[in-house]
Amino acid sequence: MAYTWLRNGFHASLAVMLVGAALETGELAPPQDGPVSWTAHADLAEAAAITLAEETFDGVTPALTGRAGSAGSNRSSPG
């Protein structure tokens, strides 16, 4: 059976959730599980369509994410 698993990057739209929490706590805390490469839903959808249309991706798990991430351990507080 042919298969392809897609590993989406961190959705940029979730940043709104982080900002909302920061407004309440005064601290902007990105995810703590390593560098985050923010990706837009539209970019992920386009990459998924291209990946699934190509037979060369059978049996692999491509990471659909940007090239560089921002470190999750960096926290910002208003000065």
Image: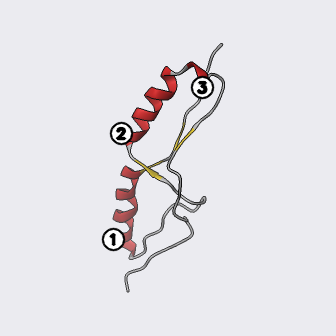
Answer left or right for 40 relative to 37.
left
Three-letter amino acid code at disc 3? Phe
Circle 3 crowding by C-alpha within 10 Å: few under 14, some 14–19, many from 20: some
Three-letter amino acid code at disc 2? Ala
Can you tell which of label 1 and label 2 is closer to the viewer? 2
Residue to which mark 2 is pinned: 42
Which sits in the foreground, 57 or 44? Answer: 57
> Residue drawn 61% across and 21% down?
3
**Which quadrant of the rendered structure holds the N terminus?**
top right
Q: Is residue 4 above or below residue 11?
A: above
Mark 3 lies on a secondary structure that is helix
Tally of numbered tags: 3
Three-letter amino acid code at disc 1? Leu
Answer yes or no: do the residues labelled 1 and 2 have beta carbons within 8 Å? Answer: no
Circle 1 crowding by C-alpha within 10 Å: few under 14, some 14–19, many from 20: few
Q: Is residue 57 above or below residue 69?
A: above
> Residue drawn 49% across and 74% down?
75
Circle 2 crowding by C-alpha within 10 Å: few under 14, some 14–19, many from 20: few
Mark 2 lies on a secondary structure that is helix
Task: Give the CA separation, mark 1 to mark 3.
Answer: 42 Å
Q: Earlier in the sequence, mark 2 or mark 3?
A: 2
Residue 23 % position (x, y):
33, 71
Residue 9 % position (x, y):
50, 46
On the image, which quarter does residue 76 sit in?
A: bottom left
Task: Give the CA separation, mark 1 to mark 2.
Answer: 27 Å
Task: Give the CA separation, mark 2 to mark 3.
Answer: 20 Å
On the image, which quarter does residue 26 sit in?
A: bottom left
* Mark sitting on residue 23: 1
Mark 1 lies on a secondary structure that is helix
Residue 42 % position (x, y):
35, 39
Residue to which mark 3 is pinned: 57
Can you tell which of label 1 and label 3 is closer to the viewer? 3
